Image (cartoon, grey):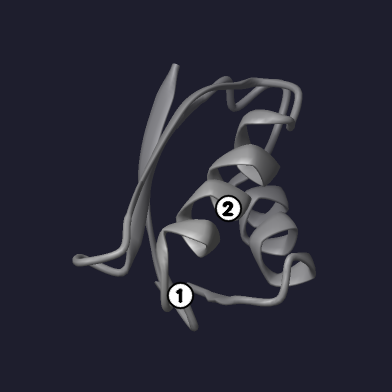
Amino acid sequence: MSDTIIKIDGMSCQGCVKNITGVLTALRGVTAAEVSLEAAEARVSFDAAAVSREALLGAIEDAGFDAS
């Protein structure tokens, strides 16, 4: 299991948090995602054999946010 912190720009409300949490947890291999509006980041636990960090970033960006 791997953990990563992803910085997210463009979140403005709890709706954004719910959207990003849903996008991340829908990915195969993601076991947990904690998104913080205040910290502008997501803490994600995932199976690196099933999903890459780049795929996590891409999913967030596809949802309309900037991720790094």
Q: Is residue 26 above or below residue 55?
A: above
- At x 41% / y 69%, what residue is drawn? 13
Q: Are marks 1 and 2 in contact (CB under 8 Å)?
A: yes
- At x 20% / y 66%, what residue is drawn? 38
Q: Amino acid at mark 2?
A: Ile
Q: Amino acid at mark 1?
A: Met
Q: Is residue 26 above or below residue 57?
A: above
Instruction: Give the residue at the far left of this rendering.
Output: 38
Q: Secondary structure at mark 2?
A: helix
- Dot 2 corresponds to which residue? 20
Dot 1 or dot 2: first in sequence order is: 1
Residue 68 point in image, percent of width and height? 48, 73
- At x 73% / y 30%, what residue is drawn? 26
Q: Is residue 8 above or below residue 3?
A: below
Q: Which mark is residue 39?
A: none
Describe residue 16's horizontal placement relative to residue 43 as left or right: right
Question: Which corner quadrant holds the N terminus?
Answer: top left
Residue 18 point in image, percent of width and height? 53, 47
Structural crowding at the residue carrying mark 1, measured as other residues with C-alpha within 10 Å and reported as few (<14), some (14–19) or many (≥20): some
Structural crowding at the residue carrying mark 2, measured as other residues with C-alpha within 10 Å and reported as few (<14), some (14–19) or many (≥20): many
Describe residue 4's horizontal placement relative to residue 56 as left or right: left
Q: Name which quarter of the figure residue 47 lies in.
A: top right
Q: How many marks?
A: 2
Give how far apart the Cα atoms at labels 1 and 2 are: 9 Å
Residue 2 point in image, percent of width and height? 42, 27
Q: Secondary structure at mark 1?
A: loop
- At x 59% / y 27%, what residue is drawn? 48
Q: Name which quarter of the figure residue 23 lies in.
A: top right
In front: 33, or 5? Answer: 33
- Dot 1 corresponds to which residue? 11
